[in-house]
Amino acid sequence: MAALAASGADGQGRATTSGGAEPRLSGSFFDIIHPNIYDSAYWTDVCWHWKEENWRALMHDMHAIGIDTAICVGTAFWGRPVFPGYEKTVGIPLKFDCPDPLGVCAEEADRLGMKMIYGVGYRGRVSQVRDYAGMEPPWPDVWFRWNTALAEALVERFGGRPSFSGLYISYEIDFNVDERQIDLYEKLIKEFLRPAVGNVKLLASPGSLGNHKDITQLPRQLERSGIDILAPQDYGGRHSNVKAALDLVRANAAGLEKVRQPLRDMGVALWTNVELFDFEATPDGRVACIAAPFERVRQQIALQAPLVEKLISYQYQGIMNRRTDLVNIGHASAETLYREYVAYLGEHFPGRFPNT
């Protein structure tokens, strides 16, 4: 994937010419159905019943604030795809009020000139590579074969569209833990996915680089894994105390700084995943995602934009969306974060985006 036009950010989030990404969110994850009904309590139940016009409105609203890349978190759930036509190879499709929500989003992305990346994974609740580490044959090969069938279906169905931009490996890997995880990631990609999809770009969004015990090993690990785009989670959403959260972001930024040149030399694109959420406790002790305070998000952007090619986010839908009759989702804090972010865009990028 081509890097964005380079400009960085000063400490206040203002555009500079020192290199790096523009200090704004140009990509976002979204989901047709979220694998965690607690995290997504403020949107997934509603989106299940959305019609075509609702999904088109979501894509339009993202595009209107400069989000040019939409990444679908998962295109199947418990072995059932969110798109029709592959019952014999992938599974019986989930039934939504919109017959083909993923197809509608792809069509709208084409119309708007956006890019789409499609998540491969979530055969069941498993979302992290370590969940496979103790399995004996024939597992994880059975699951990886299913993932390959899903990837082939996605490339066949969407690969010819102008918006198609690659696949997202939704199994999260922690490069800091042990070589067994990297063995499995390498197996999934090099033995299964790569022979099936060829040179399609593969995106991974692992845990924060701030946790890596020996960051100098990361280029070697990435070379083994065979991914094309690395977008570490910045962990800004992992603490409700803003200072503590930003300490985690600074740790990720320090890791980005150390690996940016080696990864560039390898041809691996370096993005970062800006976490937009905070957590709200629910009565049974679990948590739901709500919006973070904008002051934290602004600093997350400023700290990381100079170090990467692109800032993506988790996520516009349900956490930072404009609330309308068609996009009728999100905690009240989502609208607040949206308005504050739009004001920021209007100040730093005047006249660039329709909703600013």
Image (spheres, rainbow, N blue to C red):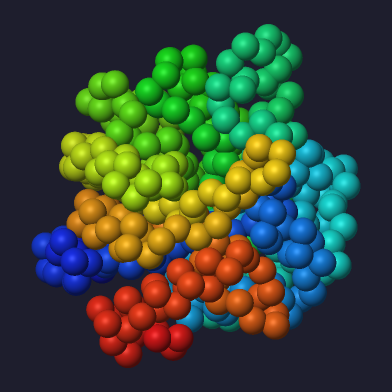
333 in relation to 40, above or below: below
Quarter of image, res 285:
top right
| Quadrant containing the C terminus in the rendered view | bottom left
Q: Between residues 210 and 218, which one lies in front from this camera angle?
A: 210
Q: Quadrant of the N terminus?
A: bottom left
Residue lying at 43% horizontally and 15% vertically, measured from the top left: 178
Closer-to-camera residue (199/209):
209
Locate residue 291, reporting x and y percent.
Answer: 50, 60
Residue in the picture at 29% in, 21% down:
213
Q: Nearer the viewer, residue 69 or 244?
A: 244
Q: Position of residue 94 (x, y in %)?
A: 84, 52
Q: Is residue 6 left or right of residue 341?
A: left
Percent x, y of residue 98: 82, 69
Nearest the viewer among 259 and 254 is: 254
84 relative position to 69: left or right: right
What residue lies at 49% left-to-right and 14% top-to-bottom?
180
Q: Could you say where residue 351 lies in the image, as x and y percent from the top left?
A: 32, 90
| 88 lies left or right of 232 | right
Asked if residue 195 can be seen in this view, the reply is no
Drawn side of residue 136 relative to residue 222, left or right: right
Q: Residue at x 39, y 73 (%)?
A: 341
Whether residue 181 is situated above or below residue 334 in the rendered picture: above
Q: Quadrant of residue 10?
A: bottom left
